[in-house]
Image: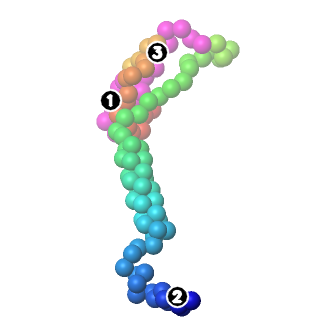
Amino acid sequence: MPPKPAITHSSTARQPHLHTIRRSKIRVILWFLAGVLLAHAQTNLAAIAGLICDPGTNAVPGARMRALSAETSAVRLSSGPSRNRPLPAGSFR
């Protein structure tokens, strides 16, 4: 029986290891997902949600809400449900 040829590092160095390729793919996917999450988190709109109640904790029908921008002194008035009416991001009083 002839002896088996020895495998040297030089013969396997030309082919990348499978675990190295997998790690590279995983890193690319993770960086891509991180970029998507960061891009999604950046927005210039805000919302105020809540319920206007009287001292007895009963909802006040037809109550109006006033948001005053601390930076521009612009006023936003709202009465009733004001869904889909975003406010510019910033500080309000």
Q: In the picture, which quadrant includes the C terminus?
A: top left
Q: Position of residue 57 (x, y in %)?
A: 66, 17
Which mark is first along the chain, 1 or 3? 1
Q: Main secondary structure of the magenta part?
A: loop
Foreground mark, 2 or 1? Answer: 2
Density class for disc 1 (Cα within 10 Å; few <14, some 14-19, many ≥20) is few
Which mark is first along the chain, 1 or 2? 2
Identify the magenta region. 59-76
Which mark is first along the chain, 3 or 2? 2
The one of 64 and 85 positioned closer to us in this rendering: 85
Three-letter amino acid code of the residue under disc 3: Pro
The one of 4 and 41 positioned closer to us in this rendering: 4
Measuring 41% from the left and 44% from the top, which residue is drawn there? 41
Q: Position of residue 19 (x, y in %)?
A: 49, 68
Q: CA distance from mark 3 to mark 1?
A: 20 Å
**Can you name the residue that lies furthest to the front here?**
1
Could you tell me which secondary element the residue under label 1 belongs to? loop
In the rendering, which numbered label is found on residue 81? 3
Q: CA distance from mark 2 to mark 1?
A: 84 Å
Residue corresponding to mark 2: 4
Foreground mark, 3 or 1? Answer: 3
Mark 2 touches mark 3? (CB < 8 Å): no
- Vertical placement of 39 versus 12: above or below? above
**Can you name the residue that lies furthest to the right here?**
56
Three-letter amino acid code of the residue under disc 2: Lys
Residue corresponding to mark 1: 74
Measuring 64% from the left and 13% from the top, which residue is drawn there? 58
Three-letter amino acid code of the residue under disc 1: Ala
Mark 3 touches mark 1? (CB < 8 Å): no
